[in-house]
């Protein structure tokens, strides 16, 4: 029997790597790099614990718990990616500016006209002043 076949038999019924594994792996690599500069034993222990947990998840047979953890991690990663994409889209929009209403915190898309303007929030109906620089 070759190594690949034995590995496949060993991993059958186990959870395997997923998004949370990769997040934990990158986090431990970043902390290990920071620890090269800082040289803290506490940080080194944290790196070991994170990697041990990641490896434990890969070899676990409890599919329900691991998939529940992975769904939570995927939701967090999706939320971060959406914020990054939204910021990128707003930065690429040269004809509008985005301001938050000071009363209800709704994000308003306003035309980019230089100067001070008064606008009305469509959500709460209150007016406020907006200053556009460029």
Image (tube, grey):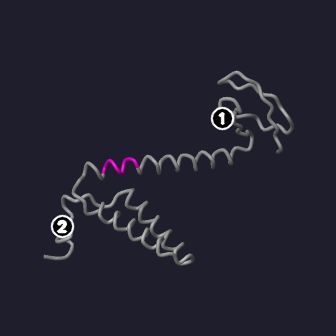
Extreme-left residue of the structure: 1
Q: Secondary structure at mark 2?
A: helix
- Position of residue 128 measured from the top left corner of the image (x, y, whole percent): 78, 29
Front one among 38 and 84: 38
Is 102 rendered above or below residue 122?
Answer: below
Callout 2: 10 Å neighbours few (<14), some, many (20+)?
A: few
Residue under pointer 1: 107
Q: Residue at x 47, y 51 (%)?
A: 77
Q: Is residue 89 magenta?
A: no
Left/right of residue 20 with respect to residue 101 in the rendered view: left
- Tell me the residue at 73%/23% (across/down): 126
Whichever of callouts 1 and 2 sits on the residue coming sooner in the sequence is: 2
**Labelled pair 1, 2 in contact (Cβ < 8 Å):** no
Residue at the right extreme of this rendering: 115
Label 1 Cα crowd, 10 Å radius (few <14 / some 14-19 / many 20+) = few
Percent coordinates x, y for residue 63 in the rendering: 24, 52
- CA distance for labels 1 and 2: 52 Å
In x, y percent, where is residue 50? 39, 65
Residue 81 in the figure: left or right of residue 68 = right
Numbered label attached to residue 10: 2
The residue drawn where x is 45% and y is 73% is 44
107 w.r.t. 13: above or below: above
Image-quadrant location for residue 1: bottom left
Q: Which secondary structure dominates the residues rendered in magenta?
A: helix
Query: Which residue is more in the foreground, 16 or 33?
Result: 33
Q: Which residues are magenta?
A: 67-72
Image position of 97 with respect to 70: above or below: above
Q: Is residue 131 left or right of residue 42?
A: right
């Amino acid at each position: 029997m070759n190594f690949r076949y034995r590995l496949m038999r060993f991993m059958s019924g186990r959870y395997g790597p997923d998004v949370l594994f990769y997040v934990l792996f990158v986090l431990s690599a970043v902390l290990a790099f920071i620890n090269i500069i800082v040289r803290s034993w506490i940080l080194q222990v944290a790196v070991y614990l994170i990697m041990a947990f990641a490896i434990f998840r890969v070899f676990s047979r409890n599919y329900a718990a691991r998939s529940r953890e992975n769904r939570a991690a995927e939701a967090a990663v999706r939320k971060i990616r959406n914020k990054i994409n939204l910021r990128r889209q707003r930065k690429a929009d040269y004809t509008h500016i985005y301001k938050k209403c000071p009363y209800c915190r709704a994000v308003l898309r306003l035309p980019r006209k230089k100067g001070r303007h008064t606008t009305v929030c469509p959500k709460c109906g209150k007016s406020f002043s907006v200053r556009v620089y460029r």
